[in-house]
């Protein structure tokens, strides 16, 4: 156990007890003060990971009723929030793609399309990584892309006498950093691409009564993801680590060999592809279909669960009882993330119910003239905090605070909440910031200094792009698409 965990496991309960023993400050109700005590304990344990993050997420079910803040039914209700089932369905579709190697075939075909030039191959890897991360976890994406990338790098090093040594090193470094960064960038394009997006969806629905649909998110998230990907590609390839290798002999052949090893598309792959394509199409066009077909009430959560259930019903060999997914496959489902969603939403509900969010908002009344600075500042805080803590835990803690600040400042909350959520997926500096960063660092092709030096500038660029890009995009969306 690390020192931080040892400190956190004792300090968290000590602070919680101390706050409970102290009288509530003026202007804060006793119930609100008790919620802040619980929040302090949860935040400290989430940050230090003194106990597993999903375990900390169960505390509201115990402590809110115990302290008289809410009933156990009220505290437990957010754990069954519809967004939990949206992500559950998305996870199951991702499991099927991984089980049948469909994600690998998609990635290799994208890479094959970008040519044999060294920079074209790098672009192909980054595009493939980002596309897969839109639908499956960034960790699974990085794990899958890493061995393919290592094979390409090994091909270069075997023919080291043909290429400048510095160019080969820069190519390898750019390849690894591109996979790490694009594993996070791609997830920002869709609601299910990364957990913070789903937390935002649930928070906005519960607190403001607004439903962010899958297609609606993509109208903003996808362009932003593309812009950030192109900026990262340019920075890595042209500015930070140019390789100047030109045509890469054997690159296209290697990708073709990888595809040949997969063989012909299997029935499992084909069936998974059909269900995935139908589910994605319904997610994107559900709003249009609901308007065209009277009485139709498609929603993202129902579509996700329908796709997930279909995976268990679609037979590959009915006589032998073989289906795309078996229930034992769900052992790899990240159930802890679903608990974390529930814990964050339950805490946010208690903060709102006891007036803490309104209290935060009052501190920012009358500063709407500085709206861009507020967005910029909160975006920066979110991004740099996510370098040292779980992005899901961060948004679970931070969104209620940000919502209060926005309301107090007279800013539409979504104009601040979405940039803060996007920023939580932009940790580019440290190996421990995200699982993809850690996976790529473990490859041995990237040093801490190289990641910090490159990530430092990308973090600043990401903050500026998020703060400047999202505000007009969100305003355009609400004036054009919600009328």
Image (tube, helix red, strand yellow):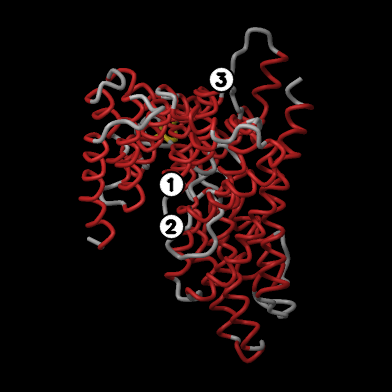
Q: Quadrant of the C terminus?
A: top right
* Picture coordinates of residue 201, whole percent (x, y): 54, 31
Residue to which mark 2 is pinned:
388
Residue found farthest to the front: 26
Few, some or many residues within 10 Å of mark 2 (<14, 14–19, 20+) = some
* Picture coordinates of residue 333, whole percent (x, y): 37, 41
Vertical relation: 374 (above or below) 361: below
* Picture coordinates of residue 435, whole percent (x, y): 44, 57
Vertical relation: 184 (above or below) 120: above
Residue to which mark 1 is pinned:
99
State if disc 1 and disc 3 touch (CB < 8 Å). Answer: no
Vertical relation: 36 (above or below) 223: above
Mark 3 or 1 closer to N-term? 1
Secondary element at tag 2:
loop
Few, some or many residues within 10 Å of mark 3 (<14, 14–19, 20+) = few
287 left or right, relative to 173: right
Residue to which mark 3 is pinned:
209
Mark 2 or 1 closer to N-term? 1
Q: CA distance from mark 2 to mark 3?
A: 32 Å
25 left or right, relative to 114: left
Mark 2 or 3 closer to N-term? 3
- Along the viewing direction, whichever of 51 and 237 lies nearer the viewer: 51
């Amino acid at each position: 156990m690390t020192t931080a965990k040892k400190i956190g496991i004792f300090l968290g309960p000590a602070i919680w007890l101390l706050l409970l023993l102290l009288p509530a400050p003026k202007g804060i109700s006793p119930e609100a003060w008790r919620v802040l005590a619980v929040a302090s304990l949860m935040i400290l344990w989430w940050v230090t990971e003194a106990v597993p993050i999903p375990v900390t997420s169960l505390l509201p079910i115990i402590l809110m009723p115990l302290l008289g803040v809410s009933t156990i039914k009220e505290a437990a209700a957010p754990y069954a929030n519809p967004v939990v089932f949206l992500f559950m369905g998305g996870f199951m579709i991702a499991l099927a793609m991984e089980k049948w190697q469909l994600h690998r075939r998609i990635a290799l075909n994208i890479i094959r399309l970008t040519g044999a030039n060294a920079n074209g191959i790098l672009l192909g890897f980054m595009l493939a990584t980002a596309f897969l991360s839109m639908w499956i976890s960034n960790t699974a994406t990085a794990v899958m892309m890493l061995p393919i990338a290592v094979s390409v790098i090994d091909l270069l090093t075997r023919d080291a006498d043909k290429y400048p040594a510095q160019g080969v090193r820069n190519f390898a470094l750019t390849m690894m950093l591109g996979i790490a960064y694009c594993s996070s960038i791609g997830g920002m394009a869709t609601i299910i691409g990364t957990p913070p997006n789903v937390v935002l969806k649930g928070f906005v629905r519960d607190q403001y009564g607004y439903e962010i649909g899958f297609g609606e998110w993509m109208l903003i998230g996808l362009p932003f993801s593309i812009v950030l990907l192109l900026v990262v590609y340019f920075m890595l390839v042209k500015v930070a680590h140019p390789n100047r290798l030109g045509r890469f002999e054997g690159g296209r052949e290697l990708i073709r060999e990888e595809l040949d090893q997969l063989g012909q598309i299997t029935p499992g792959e084909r069936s998974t592809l059909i269900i995935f394509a139908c589910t994605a199409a319904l997610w994107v066009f559900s709003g249009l279909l609901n308007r065209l077909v009277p009485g139709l009430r498609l929603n993202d959560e129902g579509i996700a669960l329908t796709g997930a259930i279909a995976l268990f019903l679609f037979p590959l060999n009915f006589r032998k009882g073989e289906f795309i997914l078996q229930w034992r496959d769900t052992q790899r489902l990240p159930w802890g993330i679903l608990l974390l969603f529930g814990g964050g939403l339950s805490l946010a509900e208690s903060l709102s119910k006891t007036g803490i969010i309104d209290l935060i908002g009052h501190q920012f009344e009358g500063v709407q003239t500085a709206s861009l600075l507020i967005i910029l500042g909160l975006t920066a805080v979110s991004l740099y905090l996510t370098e040292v803590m779980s992005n899901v835990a961060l948004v679970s803690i931070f969104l209620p605070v940000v919502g209060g600040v926005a309301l107090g400042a007279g800013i539409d909350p979504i104009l601040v909440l979405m940039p803060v959520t996007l920023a939580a997926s932009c940790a580019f500096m440290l190996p421990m910031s995200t699982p993809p960063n850690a996976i790529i660092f473990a490859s041995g092709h990237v040093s801490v200094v190289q990641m910090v030096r490159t990530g430092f500038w990308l973090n600043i660029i990401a903050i500026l792009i998020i703060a400047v890009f999202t505000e007009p995009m969100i305003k355009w969306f609400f004036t054009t698409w919600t009328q």
